[in-house]
Amino acid sequence: MRDERSRAQGLALVLTVTVVSSTVFELIGLPSAVMFGSLLGGIVHALTSPTDLRLPAWTFRLGQALIGVVVGSTISLDALAAMGDDAVAISLVTLGTILISLGAGALLALRRDVSRVTGAFAMIAGGASGVVAIARDLGADDRVVTVVQYLRVLLVLVMMPLITTIVFHPQHGGGTLATADTDLPADLLFVALSLVLGIGLSRLIPVTTSILLAPMAVAAVLASTGWLGDVAVPVPLQWLAYALIGVQVGLRFTRASLASIARMLPVVVLLMIGMIVATALMGSLLALLTPVDGLTAYLATTPGGLFAVLATAADAGSDTTYVMAVQLVRLLVILAFTPLLARLLSRPARD
């Protein structure tokens, strides 16, 4: 039987595991070592104690917004405009990834206890928080959708740094971003302006990922205009962003949540691994069809985990502009067409 921990003991355990594992991961060269370490810290507590440990909701939003600023500081607006030449390839990759995830959802729905709508929403790649938020309203089993969607994010987070390190050997890994010589007061002002203006703007945009997109857009404009000079997000703030995201994803995986889908867990994991492999192959195809490098193509086609993918892209020195564009195109397509998809899948199957 698992020990009941006090909230303070739980937080101490999470912090200890996060610091120790992040240090080890950084020493062995994993990208986004702090995110990976904090993810492990959250999981260790969630699976070893029944104590419900949750951080305030605003901390998750702050982590998302900070990652938006980190990514925005690396985006080249000129490079983004130049991506029009790859529009056909990006569209094909987007369509291919969606079809792969819908195929996985259809296979999951072969089980008698999973409807076609639930299967599709549980396996669709991208926009986990948005899909979970609308699952019940669109006729899906939101319990299954929630656990499976965040399990997909977990697998992506676990496999991504390993694949990135073993296959691509990025030059700018080690857990921190390579930054130019910058002025700390200007950097802090840059972060503050990006957060304040971005979070304020996000409240006006009815999109689930606006808390990432708005600060990212503001940061990209400020960095590109050079109004504050050469700016970057200070490394400790990058670590804070990664930790806030990683630990809260890890804390979702309690034994109770996994038990709720225990009977379908082996099938779900196999389908997700298949999705990750299939989208990685699409990334290889994208690298062949376009001038983009293999690491950037792999991260651009990873099935979900937007915040972690963008953080890893920035951390590993890949083309964050390209990764951001491809991931966001798929995300927006998914969120736009999920209501139509739900209606189509809710129709009785013809004999």
Image: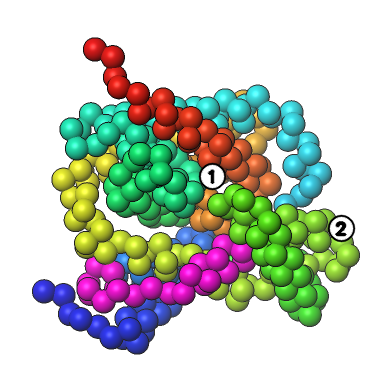
Magenta span of residues: 45-66
Q: Is residue 210 visible?
A: yes
Total label count?
2
Helix, strand or loop for disc 1: helix
Does the magenta segment cover residue 47?
yes
Comes first in the chain, label 1 or label 2: 2
Image position, residue 238 (x, y; %) = 60, 69
The answer to whether 301 is drawn above or below residue 67 in the figure is above
Q: Is residue 230 left or right of residue 18?
A: right
Image position, residue 27 (x, y; %) = 47, 69
Which of the numbered marks, if any, corresponds to residue 33? none
The reply to whether the C-beta atoms of the residues labelled 1 and 2 are less than 8 Å apart is no
The C terminus, quarter of image: top left
Amino acid at the residue labelled 1: Leu
Q: Mark 2 points at which residue?
A: 225
Image position, residue 146 (x, y; %) = 35, 51
Separation of residues labelled 1 and 2 (CA atoms): 27 Å
- Of all residues shown, which one is farthest toward the front? 137
Q: Mark 1 points at which residue?
A: 299
Q: In which quarter of the image is residue 131?
A: top left
Amino acid at the residue labelled 2: Thr
* Residue at 57% across, 62% down: 64
* Residue at 26% across, 64% down: 254
Rate crowding at label 1 as few (under 14), some (14 to 19) or many (20 or more) other CA atoms within 10 Å. many
**Predominant secondary structure, magenta span:** helix
